[in-house]
């Protein structure tokens, strides 16, 4: 079973996965006239409104909107122009909320970026805000919001053991919390059936995983499937009779497929979707009609394989009426007669609409970033190139608008994870850099998810080695195409992308004139020793994927790939940014790299935010970071930079 680590959380506010088939026609109409310089704040300030949801009875919209520069929950009665703010958090954005029932809204919130999310509840008039899980040092994860049981919710909490999550049922009327199963020490995930009964558990011994099943909550769990972590066998949901499972599986194949699995016989009985080139992703369904609607997968953009004619007709109507480039349904009423969906592209943020099935009418709800004119933004093009050992590396190239695509300053932007991927869609960082005249290269190096088992496993124990070669080969491809000015290439990334930045400056210093490391790993030994406690069940897995510090051979490999041990090879200026409360990449990762470079007299800027974690969430901190980034890039590869001879640079 694969594990994936998230991007810095604030980017989720902006990222969607979309594209247009007639892009080339639009681009050819663009004159070579650079757009106006857009204020930095327009890219990184909070959206005007965000995350619309509709109440189960279809009477209200809820959404997030800034209050004192923090995203808070608001509601609005449908048909009424007035809106009501029902939360007032002034310390940190609320990132996730949902309707518990027609009268109550639930939301998750942490403190200072520590990712120990607690569950809160409020009535829709803003009264009786209540913290449902007031336990220090405890993280809450949603298991099932129980839409058909409006007075309850099931969550996981590591209250009994920081490394393990037990399932709890919370009564929203009384606040009573009842533990409904005990984690024996090896369960990493729980899943309910369509009646809200807890009937699936996923276990791991660190490398092998098992799926446990029970016919009812009164019976014991027993194993129905076992696989190594290198294989995917991920239950998605029960069949509508609650007898069998729909599963994401790559057993006997390279790419993840969506299949139906017969629990009693222990066999795969039907393949609902598979693709020769890309993994299947999610599976959606109609709760009311009890039919599967579509399978989601990501090629160079997000795509749907439809399983239901009615749903396909609805999406086709929306596409046709709005001339949308990509859409995604986010929320519906319990009767499924009203749907909230978003449209977006690579050049626009999310725009919200509601589709009324009864009237066949589409109404605009909100444009989240009305201050950004898509005509002034750049296209994100899908690209591919060959790695030095023959793999096809896919990615995206965003060229600054209105300039000839030759001899440009470039920002190479490897993604975080690393077991994640870059996708097509609106990315405020990329658009900001393109607006400032930089070409931006994003590549899905080996290990990126969505390309099958073989491609993913090609990354094992290749941090700083073949994974980094894939990044370097992208730079060389840009140079061979005449797009990049070899003297003006910078590398920037967050999380694993921050590690790739440090590894790039360390192991291929001839390629880069500057680097920006954002909450990145600098020391593979200390990183392994400071992972969050709830990652502990995956430690053996990480040893196989990255390396085991206690193993003699692996320790040598890790030492070779640890940038801080080779800081003497860094010659380019470096900017490092770090959240003090980061639970994933400890602040010590950045501290030790800064100390090593300062001891050698290397130009290094260091920004630490005491109220942030793995990525900067608060708006003012984002502004500070990107202002510093802009000045740094201007100085070293941009309008204020001086020409530097490559041979001189690496001596």
Image (cartoon, helix red, strand yellow):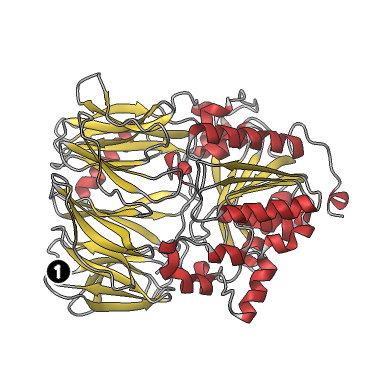
Query: Residue 609: x percent and y percent?
Result: 56, 41
Residue at image mark 1: 243
Residue found 26% across the figure and 33% down from its top: 62
Query: Residue 300: x percent and y percent?
Result: 48, 51
The answer to whether residue 526 shows anywhere in this view is yes
Q: Is residue 483 left or right of residue 363?
A: right
Residue 263's place in the image compared with 534, above or below, is: below
Image quadrant occupied by the C terminus? bottom right
Residue 448's place in the image compared with 94, above or below, is: below
Residue found 50% across the figure and 48% down from its top: 581
Between 255 and 175, which is closer to the camera in this rendering? 175
Count residues near mark 1 (Cα–Cα under 10 Å), then give few for <14, some for 14-19, many for 20+: few
Dot 1 falls on a residue whose secondary structure is loop
Total labels: the figure holds 1
Q: Is residue 249 left or right of residue 456?
A: left
Q: Quadrant of residue 477?
A: bottom right
Residue furthest front as drawn: 136
Query: Residue 431: x percent and y percent?
Result: 56, 36
The answer to whether residue 3 shows anywhere in this view is no
Between 402 and 417, which is closer to the camera in this rendering? 417
Q: Quadrant of residue 85?
A: top left
Query: Residue 136: x percent and y percent?
Result: 36, 51
Image quadrant occupied by the N terminus? bottom left
Residue found 60% across the figure and 43% down from its top: 608
């Amino acid at each position: 079973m694969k594990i994936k680590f998230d991007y810095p959380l604030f980017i989720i506010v902006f990222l969607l996965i979309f594209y247009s088939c007639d892009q080339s026609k639009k681009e050819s109409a663009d004159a070579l006239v650079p757009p106006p310089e857009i204020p930095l704040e327009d890219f990184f300030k909070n959206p005007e409104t965000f995350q619309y949801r509709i109440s189960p009875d279809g009477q209200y919209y809820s959404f997030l909107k800034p209050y004192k520069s923090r995203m808070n929950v608001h509601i609005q009665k449908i048909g009424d122009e007035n809106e009501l703010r029902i939360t007032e958090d002034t310390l940190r954005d609320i990132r996730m909320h949902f309707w518990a029932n027609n009268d109550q809204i639930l939301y998750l919130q942490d403190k200072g970026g520590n990712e120990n999310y607690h569950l809160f509840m409020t009535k829709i008039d803003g009264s009786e805000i209540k913290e449902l899980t007031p336990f220090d040092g405890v993280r809450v994860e949603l298991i099932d919001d129980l839409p058909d049981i409006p007075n309850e919710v099931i969550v996981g909490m590591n209250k009994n053991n920081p490394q393990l999550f037990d399932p709890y049922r919370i009564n929203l009327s009384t606040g009573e919390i009842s533990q409904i199963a005990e984690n024996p020490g090896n369960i990493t995930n729980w899943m309910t059936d369509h009646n809200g009964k807890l009937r699936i558990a996923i276990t791991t011994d660190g490398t092998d995983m098992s799926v446990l099943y029970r016919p009812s909550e009164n019976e014991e769990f027993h194993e129905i499937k076992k696989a190594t972590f290198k294989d995917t066998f991920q239950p998605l949901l029960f069949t509508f009779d609650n007898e069998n499972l729909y599963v994401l599986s790559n057993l006997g194949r390279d790419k993840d497929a969506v299949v139906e699995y017969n629990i009693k016989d222990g066999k795969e009985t039907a393949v609902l979707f598979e693709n020769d080139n890309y993994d299947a992703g999610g599976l959606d369904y109609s709760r009311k009609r009890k039919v599967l609607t579509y399978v989601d997968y990501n090629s160079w953009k997000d795509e749907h394989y439809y399983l239901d004619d009615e749903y396909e007709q609805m999406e086709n109507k929306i596409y046709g009426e709005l001339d949308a480039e990509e859409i995604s349904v986010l929320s519906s009423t319990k009767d499924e007669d009203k749907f909230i969906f978003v449209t977006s592209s690579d050049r626009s943020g999310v725009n919200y609409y509601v589709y009324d099935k009864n009237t066949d009418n589409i109404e605009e709800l909100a444009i989240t970033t009305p201050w950004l004119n898509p005509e002034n933004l750049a296209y994100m093009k899908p690209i591919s190139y060959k790695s030095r050992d023959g793999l096809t590396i896919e990615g995206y190239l965003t060229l600054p608008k209105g300039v000839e695509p030759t001899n440009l300053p470039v920002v190479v932007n490897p993604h975080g994870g690393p077991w994640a991927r870059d996708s097509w869609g609106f990315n405020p960082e990329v658009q900001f850099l393109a607006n400032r005249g930089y070409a931006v290269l994003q590549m899905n190096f080996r290990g990126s998810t969505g390309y099958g088992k073989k491609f993913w496993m090609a990354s094992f124990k290749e941090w700083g080695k073949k994974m980094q070669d894939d990044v370097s080969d992208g730079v060389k491809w840009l140079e061979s195409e005449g797009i990049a000015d070899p003297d003006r290439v910078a590398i920037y990334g967050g999380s694993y992308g921050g590690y790739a930045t440090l590894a790039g400056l360390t192991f291929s210093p001839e390629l880069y004139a500057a680097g920006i490391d954002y909450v990145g790993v600098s020391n593979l030994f200390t990183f392994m020793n400071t992972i969050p406690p709830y990652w502990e069940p995956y430690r053996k897995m990480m040893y196989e994927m990255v390396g085991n510090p206690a193993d003699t051979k692996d320790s040598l490999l890790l030492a070779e790939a640890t940038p801080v041990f080779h800081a003497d090879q860094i010659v380019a200026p470096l900017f490092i940014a770090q959240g003090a409360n980061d639970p994933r990449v400890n602040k010590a990762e950045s501290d030790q790299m800064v100390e090593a470079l300062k001891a050698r007299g290397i130009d290094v800027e260091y920004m630490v935010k005491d109220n942030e974690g793995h990525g900067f969430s608060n708006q003012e901190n984002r502004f500070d970071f990107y202002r510093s980034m802009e000045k740094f890039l201007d100085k070293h590869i941009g309008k204020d930079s001086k020409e530097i001879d490559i041979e001189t640079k690496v001596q």
